[in-house]
Amino acid sequence: MLKFVRAIRKRLDTEIILATNAIRFAFVNKSRNHPDASWHNAVLKNETEVESAIKQIRKLGLPLIKDLPKNWDALAAVDLILRNTETDARIFDAGGEVYSMILPWLALYGYKNLVAGNLVFKKPLRCGPISYIHSDITQTGFEPESFDAVTCMSVIEHGVNLRDYFREMARILKAGGVLVTSADYFETPIDTSGLCAYGSPIHIFSKDEIISALAIAAEYGLEPISPLDPTSCNKVARWKRFGLDYTFIVFSLRKSA
C-alpha cells in the first residue's frame, strides 16, 4: 500500500512540475539577460559562491533549483550553452529528471530542441520544447553527431561507467560541441563504503579520480575548454540521509573537430 501511495505522489509531483513549466514557457523572453557564470571548469569552494549564483538566477527571473548548491553548477552549464549555441541548437540533458532546471531555463531563453534522457522515464513525456525520453546515457540510441551540447549534472557518481559515458557523449556530440558534467566531489577521498542510493553504490569523486576521468575523455577527443583547478575548500553540500559532507565539481569539454 505504501509503495502504491508513493507512486501516486510521485506521479502527482511530476504533473505539477510539468504544468508549472508549461505556464512558464508561455512567457519566453528571448531578450532576457544572459548569466555571467564563467566557472565552467571549477570546484564549488564556499557558500558565498552559491549565494552569488542564486542572486543571479533571481535577477534573471529564472526558477531556482530546490537543492540550492546545485544552482551553482547548473548556472555554469547554461552560461556555457548560451555562449556557444543559438536557440535552434539541439541540447541533451543526460540523466535529467522532470525536476531538473537546465532545460526549462534554456526554454525560457527560446531554445526549441531540448531532450532529457533517463531510465526512469517509462514512456515519453512532453512539455513545451522539452521531450523526456527513456534513455541509457552510456548507450542512448541517438544518431552520431545529434547534439550541439550535452549536460550531465550529478549523474556519473551513481554507478556510471566513465569510459562508456565519454565514448557515447563523444559519439552523439557534433564536432565542436560542448559537454558539461558535474559530480559530487572533494579533493581528498571520502569513505562511502557500504552506502547505496538509487540502486547503486554512493561515490564521491576525488582529485585523482577526476584527473583520470579527464584522461579517458581525452581519448575520445573531448578536451577541457579551460584549465581546471581541482582544489577544494569547504564542504558546501550535505547529504543528511547518509551524513555525508562534500562539494561539487563541474568540468566542461569540447569535442575536437
Image: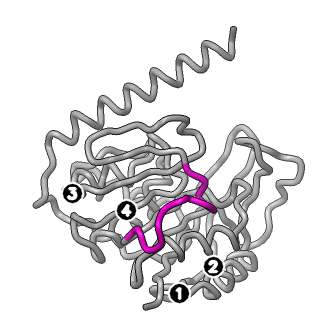
Compute the Cα span from label 3 to label 1. 27 Å
Q: Residue 17 at x, y = what percent? A: 38, 32
Mark 2 element type: loop
Compute the Cα span from label 4 to label 3. 13 Å
Compute the Cα span from label 4 to label 2. 30 Å
Q: What stretch is highlighted in magenta?
A: 135-147
Residue located 44% across and 46% down the image: 100
Compute the Cα span from label 1 to label 4. 19 Å
User: What residue is shown with label 3?
Assistant: 109
Q: Which numbered disc covers residue 223?
A: 1
Q: Quadrant of the C terminus?
A: bottom left
- Amino acid type of the residue that numbered disc 1 sits on in the rendered structure: Glu
Mark 1 vs mark 4: in front: 4
Above or below, comparing residue 250 to residue 221 in the picture: above
Residue located 19% across and 56% down the image: 110
Evaluate if marks 4 and 2 touch, with contact meaning CB atoms under 8 Å apart.
no
Q: Which numbered disc covers residue 231?
A: 2
Compute the Cα span from label 2 to label 1. 19 Å
- Amino acid type of the residue that numbered disc 4 sits on in the rendered structure: Ile
Choose the circle earlier in sequence order: 3 or 1: 3
Choose the circle earlier in sequence order: 4 or 2: 4
Mark 3 element type: loop
Evaluate if marks 3 and 1 touch, with contact meaning CB atoms under 8 Å apart.
no
Q: Quadrant of the N terminus?
A: top right
User: What residue is shown with label 4?
Assistant: 91
Evaluate if marks 4 and 3 touch, with contact meaning CB atoms under 8 Å apart.
no
- Amino acid type of the residue that numbered disc 3 sits on in the rendered structure: Tyr
